[in-house]
Image: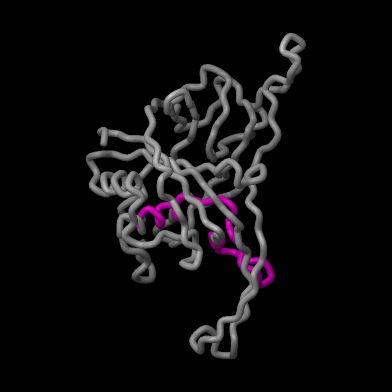
Amino acid sequence: MREKCLVSFDLRADFGFFKKPDYNDGLLLSYNMLHKPALLGILGAIIGLQGYDSKGVLPEYYQRLSSLPVGIAPLEGYHNRGNFEKTVVKYTNTVGYANKDGNLLIEESMLIRPAYRCYLLLDSGIEDHVRLHEYLKNGQAEYVPYLGKNEYPVWFGDTFQEYDYESFVATRNFKIDSLFIKERIIKNEKVEESYSWDMEAMLNASSFTYFERLPVGFDIELMQYEMAEFAYSDWILKAGASISNLYLLKNGEEELVVQLF
């Protein structure tokens, strides 16, 4: 492992559920995108760190991994313009401690075939990062990782990639290949489409931008999610567009621009 190492791996599952703290008329809602606190929980399970143990105390995996820079993108072929298929399931909890007044009836949204590519900037001077590199490369895990609920196990084997990388400065038009934090109105940063008579094709063609407000960490005093506005798009953005923490990744002939946060 190099001193600083930027890697990626894929997460795929049949179903997923990333519970939102709010709900709508009794229906438990799920975030569409994998968010950083959930990803850190998966990474913690892979290397055997403890989860929630005491009320009001952040779990071990979050305390030890919260400073890890990560990037997240929905995996091509599994989403439709950033959205995953969803359905609603209804089930009954009949155990006595669930509801003193009788059976607990629950309606819950569920993602169908969610899949994500996750990017990590690992530091060989941090033991947990070294273990993550080893476990992800070898497709190993101490605990079974899952997407939000333990009945939704996730697969990540044989998808590990390592990249040459550098900080990306927007001196040319570019596209961001991951989720990114929307710091301003990105429509103003978009390169307009035009038709090339010489090439007989549209230039800078694009089709969608997806938005979602997602957790990026925890407010330690309130023990609530800290949130940020995210976007994911195939828009071509102008040179000079101001988006922070972008990296240019190279793997053979492949080049990607991703944001780590």
Residue at 39% from the left image edge and 27% from the top image edge = 165
- What quarter of the picture does the N terminus occupy? top left
The answer to whether residue 233 is left or right of residue 45 is right
- What quarter of the picture does the C terminus occupy? top left
**Residue furthest to the front:** 158
The answer to whether residue 98 is left or right of residue 219 is right
* 219 in the magenta segment: no
The front one of 37 and 148 is 148
Q: Percent from the top left, x then y, of residue 10?
A: 46, 46
Residue at 60% from the left image edge and 35% from the top image edge = 184
Decide: is 242 above or below 73: above
Q: Percent from the top left, x then y, of residue 172?
A: 55, 17
Number of marks in picture: 0
Residue at 52% from the left image edge and 31% from the top image edge = 243
First to last magenta residue range: 18-44
Colour convention of the picture: one colour
The front one of 212 and 127 is 127
